[in-house]
Image: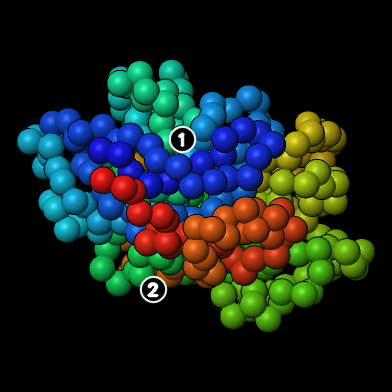
Amino acid sequence: MIVSAYAAPSATEPLAPTTVERRDPGPHDVQIHIEYAGICHSDIHTARSEWGPARYPLVPGHEIAGVVTAVGADVTKFEVGDRVGVGCFVDSCRECAACRAGEEQYCERGMIGTYNAVGRDGEPTQGGYSTHIVVDEKYVCRIPEGIDLAEAAPLLCAGITLYSPLKHWNAGPGKRVAIIGLGGLGHMGVKIAHALGAEVTVLSQSLKKMEDGLRLGADHYYATSDPDTFKTLRGKFDLIVNTVSANLDMHQYFSLLAIDGTLVEVGLPEHPVPVNVFDLCRNRRSFAGSMIGGIAQTQEMLDFCAEHGLGAEIEVIAADRINEAYERVIASDVRYRFVIDTATLPAVAQ
Ligand SMILES: [Zn+2]
Ligand SMILES: [Zn+2]
């Protein structure tokens, strides 16, 4: 099926309308009518080949929410009309220890990305800035009733990127959790950590978004540009999740961890991060990283968000504003996620 999409023709040109071909659903595939696709900062890095040379034309988008329009003969999880989501990957080897443990994002042979990868059929994968996608049912999640599809889309990357480490490092009642940065990732971290019952602090460069942070569920809000913040909060946190991709002075942030505290990186800084091991030995601190989550945990996250009435804070845009939205994401001028309404993609001449 030929479907409408927005693609980057090269690393240096703006995204433009185009068409892509989606395979006919195989026995285990579901065909999804995409209604909304979130814009993740990774889309921009990839579209501009900032993380290595990308395959062009490239249709980004790995925060996909839509409705099933067709299912293959052997599909058991989904029916036509189901509300579903697709996140950062659409396949993996299914055999390695990570895949068998439901941690497909750490597949030993490498997960197959939703875009900028090659699928099992040998064709390049193309992402969610498009009206339809065809995905193996194993890599599709159900979006429960009770979450708006547009607000659900960013959960498929931003939501699970925060949910997974918060669960892994036991954020919950009695735990003091700090989220560095209140952006697309950070705002989901605040909502989820709060819903898990943790005491939540936002560490942001300034107090500009303080009102938002408190409304989203933070108990405290501090500006990291104020040197007093690091004195006041010394040794306070059991868990710090860093969503900021800029290089930070880690010594300052490690000093905020309590004994056995962990600082987890989910943003990806451009340059290597220098660490003074002394900071870790003191207080038996850990420095860790985490990347999205497996399919089972992504489903668990969607169910959790539905149960707690959590969606992303979004600004819905028409497809012809994608390039403008990219500039605003880079300038951190979005509260807190752009979501493309795919009904605004140009119709395909049949
Ligand atoms: Zn993403
Ligand atoms: Zn695997």
- Callout 1 secondary element: loop
Q: Is residue 198 left or right of residue 207?
A: left
Q: Would you say the beta carbon of the disc 1 residue lies within 8 angstroms of ligand 1?
A: no
Q: Residue at x 46, y 27 (%)?
A: 117
Q: Quadrant of residue 151?
A: bottom left
Q: Residues within 10 Å of mark 2 (few under 14, many from 20)?
A: few
- Callout 2 secondary element: loop
Q: Looking at the rendered structure, which numbered label has been put on residue 115?
A: 1
Q: Residue at x 63, y 25 (%)?
A: 53
Residue 114 seen by the camera: no
Is 117 or 193 nearer to us in this picture? 117
Q: Quadrant of residue 27?
A: top left
Percent of width and height locating residue 20:
38, 37
- In the picture as drawn, the residue positioned furthest to the left comes out as 73
Residue denoted by label 2: 309
Q: Quadrant of residue 223?
A: bottom right
